[in-house]
Image: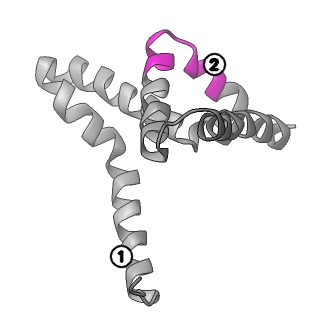
Amino acid sequence: MDYLRAFLVGGAFCAIGQILIDKTRLTPARILTGFVCAGVILSLIGVYEPLADFAGAGASVPLTGFGHNLFLGVKEGIRENGILGILTGPLTAASGGICAVVVFALIAAFVSKPKMK
């Protein structure tokens, strides 16, 4: 049942993204940024945490989950460091994911052969 819930919620996020690509003139970069911002906003109003509890990886893996993670980092950073936590909190919360992206991109760069257009 967990897999089904993750599939349905993650698929809904993907369907929303596909609709935005097909029906609007937004660039993919703006849509991806919008998903991160949506994760922050949904976390701020208290909707994302129950959704993540319900859907598991279907809500935590997409970019909305990254936005939720940034929000939690800001919240924790403000609690620990005051106003400076606005800057340090998100970096601390997302450092593992950012490091993984850099490492995997480096591995992909070493493995692949770039082609000139």
Residue 27 x/y as whole percent: 46, 43
Identify the residue shown where x is 18% and y is 26%: 85
Identify the residue shown where x is 48% and y is 9%: 45
Which residue corresponds to mark 1? 106
Q: Is 43 in the magenta? A: yes
Q: Residue 17 sits in which quadrant?
A: top right
Residue 48 x/y as whole percent: 56, 21
Q: Residue 83 sits in which quadrant?
A: top left
Q: Disc 2 on helix, strand or loop?
A: helix
The amino acid type, in three-letter code, at marker 2 is Pro
> Quick one: 18 or 94, which is closer to the camera?
18
* Residue 110 versus residue 5 in the image, above or below: below
Identify the residue shown where x is 48% and y is 25%: 38
Kindly report the secondary structure that dominates the magenta region of the rendered protein: helix
Q: Is 2 in the magenta? A: no
Q: Disc 1 on helix, strand or loop?
A: helix
Which residue corresponds to mark 2? 50
Identify the residue shown where x is 29% and y is 35%: 90
Q: Which residues are magenta?
A: 41-52
